[in-house]
Image: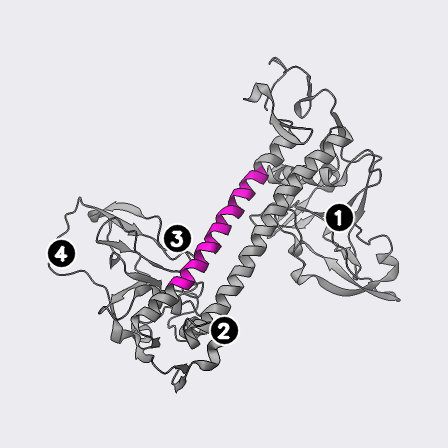
Amino acid sequence: MNSTTNEILPQGYKMTELGALPEEWEVVQLENKYIEFQNGLWKGKKEPYIKVKVLRNTNFNNDGTINFDDVAELDVEQRNFKNREIIKDDIILERSGGGPTQPVGRVVFFEKSDQFRYSFSNFTSRIRVTDKLRIFPKFLFYYLLDFYHQGKTNDIQNRTTGIRNLDFSKYKQISLPLPPLPEQQKIAAVLSVVQEAKEKAEAVIDATKALKKSMMKHLFTYGPVPPEETENVPLKETEIGKVPEEWEVVKLGEVFEFSKKPKNLKINDNDLIPFIPMEMISDTNQSIKYWEEKRYSEIPSGSFVFKNDIIIAKITPSFENGKQAILDKLPLDYGYATTEIWALHPKNENVITQYLYYYLKVDPIRVNLARKMEGSTGRQRLPKHVLENISLPLPPLPVQQKIASILSAIDAKIEAEENKKQALEELFKTLLHNLMTANIRVDKDRINLKEHEL
């Protein structure tokens, strides 16, 4: 809510420096007797040393979570560590870093409990609530996270070449809305539920991607048979390794051809043509869902494509990143795409595009092709002759269809979870700001919009 002193305040609200807030809410300065601050850890030069895990700003995620995959384990002065150990419910603030575009001032909340001892680097600071009957630590964390998401740290940072530094003295002077403790706890609980649901969706995505990677290796070696039946699949040795005996090994160019505009196709300058730039080619989704509409006269250069073609990025880093798609949703029988792609379609009915799509997603295949790219550093491209001469394991058509169907089902699961994760991210950000500004109030076990906002 953006009420001003000239507007009529809703019943039960008062005007504060943060805007209209409930009468029972206080506004205090971040630096107060209930909160203590501690600057980060230097390794030091005096023994004895103690080995600890040190959180750096590289371990900060923008959503307030911590990436524990790459936490540094360092020997540091025991005396330096003494007052700098992180404990449950501590908040760690990023004071320096950010890079040229990302504002500094991210926060993370420490909840981990394991056998390791943790500290925080000299480019960060710890914020610790010393009176949890006055301020609920996770409520404070969520407020500081919203403060960052709203871009408010932009006004209290100094920029040098490639580095941003937070003005910590000004940061400690920011105003903090303080509901009664039970409401702080409820607000934090609501936000935690949404954040945990998002984390569960991420875990499902990671697990499903791992399953897909394993399944691809299995399918292109044994075919669509259960793992327990692989010993019963007769294999033969080929130039690309072992494949089932009934499979062929062919050159890609034997079964696929590169698309080009037919000589008898007439297109008028004012005809609207679907055009696909590189940014609209996904590295995960099989289909192109969006395209630009351009008049034919507005396409000075481009690669001609047919509907249902597979298009493959040929320039670095798009190729290495896996940018490719099938044009099954194109509104016309043809279109144009960036010149930095190869477009192919089957030569006959004995092969399907979906099968090639997934084969080119196999990590060793793509890595091998990437090694054969040509050109100057940063502008390397995959030559046509390299792509058309790769060896392709070719099972009978029903087997190709089964393999594509299995992998498409896994992709559908990943996409559904990605959509769920995105929806939860948007819900979290919306709730975060509205709860912190009292546009939404937590009432008992429910979230109710204030009547004046409906």
Point out the tag, 3 or 1, that comes first from the N-terminus.
Answer: 1
For residue 186, the mark is none
Q: Up-down: is 443 above or below 296?
A: above
Q: Which residue is mark 3?
A: 279
227 and 289: which one is in front?
227
Q: CA distance from mark 2 to mark 3?
A: 38 Å
Residue lying furthest bottom in this view?
237
Q: Earlier in the sequence, mark 2 or mark 4?
A: 2
**Do the CB atoms of the residues marked 4 and 1 lie less than 8 Å apart?**
no
Q: Position of residue 219 (x, y in %)?
A: 43, 72
Apparent side of residue 114 relative to residue 266 in the rendered image (left or right):
right
Q: Is residue 290 above or below residue 358?
A: above
Kindly indicate whether the residue at mark 2 contacts the one at mark 1 (C-beta within 8 angstroms): no
Instruction: Give the residue type at disc 1.
Output: Ser
Residue 253, by quadrant, is: bottom left
Label 4 to label 1, Cα distance in Å? Answer: 66 Å
Whether residue 410 is in magenta: the answer is yes
